Amino acid sequence: MADFNLVRLSSVIPPGAKVQTVTGDEQLVGGHGDLLYCVYAEAHAELPLHEAWAGVAWALADDGSGAGLFVEHEGPAREQVERDLHASLDDLIAGRGGGYHPAGRLVTSAVCETEPVCALVVATYTSQGWA
């Protein structure tokens, strides 16, 4: 992630997409300055013992097309982020008349000990080089 230029997108997952969760070794690698189209949640904590929580949740279309919706939230407590993710996803689904089901979520945190910290969850769509 460190070498990408992030291009933030809204919450719509295109048909044919496949949502996967990956760990550090499996994360997307690109060239220095490449564009990364993504949805992300970022939270910061700058004071000792303060927490930063960030999360992304998603729903997929019931028709199996791979289409779906992302929501992202940040806050100082896990409970708040979880509650906000749930409420936002329910609202997006209801606003479209249904037809989607919750399919997953990823929440992370960081605690400030002495230096500022950032909690970050990124859902990537694709990357693109400049050349």
Image: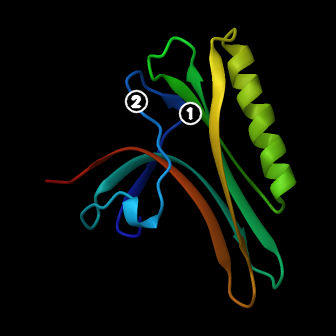
Q: Which residue lies furthest to the top in this view?
A: 97
- Three-letter amino acid code of the residue under disc 1: Ser
Q: Which residue is drawn at 81% across and 57% down?
A: 78
- Residue 8: image location, x then y, percent: 49, 46
Depth order, front residue of 50/10: 50
- Residue 26: image location, x then y, percent: 38, 59
Q: Is residue 23 placed above or below 40 in the rendered structure? A: below
Q: How far apart are marks 1 and 2 (CA)?
A: 13 Å
Helix or strand or loop: what does disc 1 sit on? loop
Task: Identify the image quadrant of residue 117.
Answer: bottom right
Q: Residue at x 54, y 35 (%)?
A: 10
Residues under numbered marks 1 and 2 in contact, where contact means CB atoms less than 8 Å apart: no
The residue singled out by tag 1 in the image is: 11
Q: Which of marks 1 and 2 is nearer the N terminus?
A: 1
Depth order, front residue of 17/84: 17
- Residue 7: image location, x then y, percent: 42, 49
- Check residue 17 in the rendering and tell me which mark sits there, or answer none: 2
Q: Which residue is drawn at 28% across and 58% down?
A: 34
